[in-house]
Image: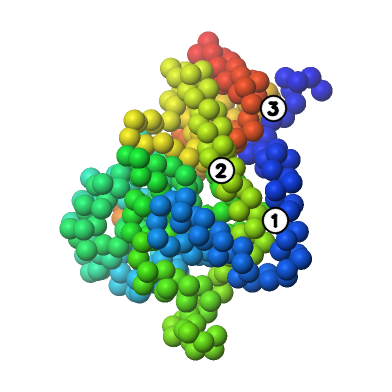
Amino acid sequence: MTDRARPLSFADLGAQYRRLKPAIDARIQAVLDHGRFILGPEVAELEDALAVYAGCAHAVGVASGTDALQIALMGEGIGPGDAVFLPAFTFTATAEVVALLGATPVFVDVDPRSFTIDCGDLARRLAALKDLRARAVIAVDLFGLPADYAALRDLAGRHGLFLLADAAQSFGATLNGARVGTLAPVTALSFFPAKPLGCYGDGGALLTDDADRAARYRSIRAHGKGDGKYDIERVGLNSRLDTLQAAILLAKLAAFDDDLTAREAVARRYDAALAGLVITPHRTNRSRSAWAQYAILLDDRAAMVEFLKTRGVPTAVHYPRPLHRQPAYAHFANGPLPVSEMLCDRILSLPMHPDLDEAASQRICAAVKEAVVAAGS
Ligand SMILES: *Cc1c(COP(=O)(O)O)cnc(C)c1O
């Protein structure tokens, strides 16, 4: 097969493993040797390392990013009669946890450039709320870019809302020099394999400066236990982070800054080659993205996807449908969300991972260019 036709990978976890293999293998072997598979020493070690990295007081490892979101809401006692505001343009899990707890997701539109929650629309929907208590807002740092937390903290403060950061895609990003994990009172992380900091299965964490909240999260992740193993203080979950996953994450965290730098370099190469051809991602001097995805906007996405396939360039659509148009959530729909709807029709994610080298970037950009030229002729 010629180099030109060899399929590229969308998120090359194999290349990262080959790069970090000695450290990852040694960490895994250590867990197999000590045998403390549930809440073993690596979990506490990782929690400390995450808190230090983010610059917050407490980190609590849990079984997934989805559980991290759910536990955060459970920790506030959110349930029936409560409204939780969240963007319509996000992964399903952000709304799922709200509905699972019997609360009502209130969908909010997003900003057309940053793809994060539109605080003007949030204020309008807060003012229009009827028959429900406004309790919380979940901001999503979509594709790795932090939302507008200054405006969100202001709105949350004025309306008495719990502000939760869904940072499943943005760990490692910064806003005005502050790290994700310090931008909201509580931050939820996911370690799903394809996230910027991913493990080899499911995993997640909660970050906070609040000791009482951290203690509640530790209780909820272990069946609601109190001081003794069989003192049950609340209804909880079985949602611990596996020791093996924590061990893998410790090895990956040591290389995380290098990975983030490599992702930024990939994004810059894309920006330089694609600006003017397609709509490239939003950038500001205030924030640095974790580049979970590099997503462009196109007029004819289907044609681009088909063309790139013929050149061995994989793509993905995050996300093809806004949440208020999903059958499971349609009954929560509360009016049109034109930006979210437009983005779902036009968005396309290009390959993005730290091991995407210059030659692969060039091949991808040349193929995008070829498709744009073909469409224009
Ligand atoms: C991945 C993701 C989640 C869920 O994380 P899991 O670890 O897969 O449960 C939640 N929100 C967003 C925005 C995500 O991208």
Residue shown at 52%/61% (left/top)? 47
Q: Secondary structure at mark 2?
A: helix
Question: Vertical placement of 200 versus 226: above or below?
Answer: above
Q: What residue did someone put label 2 on?
A: 256
The front one of 281 and 368 is: 281
Q: What residue did someone put label 1 on?
A: 27
Q: Which of the marked residues, 1 or 2, is nearer the chain's N terminus?
A: 1
Tell me which amino acid carries mark 1.
Arg
Left or right of 248 in this view: 150: left
Image quadrant holding the N terminus, namely top right
Q: Secondary structure at mark 3?
A: loop
Judge the density around disc 3: few (<14), some (14-19), many (≥20) Cα neighbours within 10 Å.
Answer: some
CA distance separating discs 1 and 2 = 16 Å
Tell me which amino acid carries mark 2.
Phe
Q: Which of the marked residues, 1 or 3, is nearer the chain's N terminus?
A: 1
Foreground mark, 3 or 2, reads: 2
Q: Residue furthest bottom?
A: 231
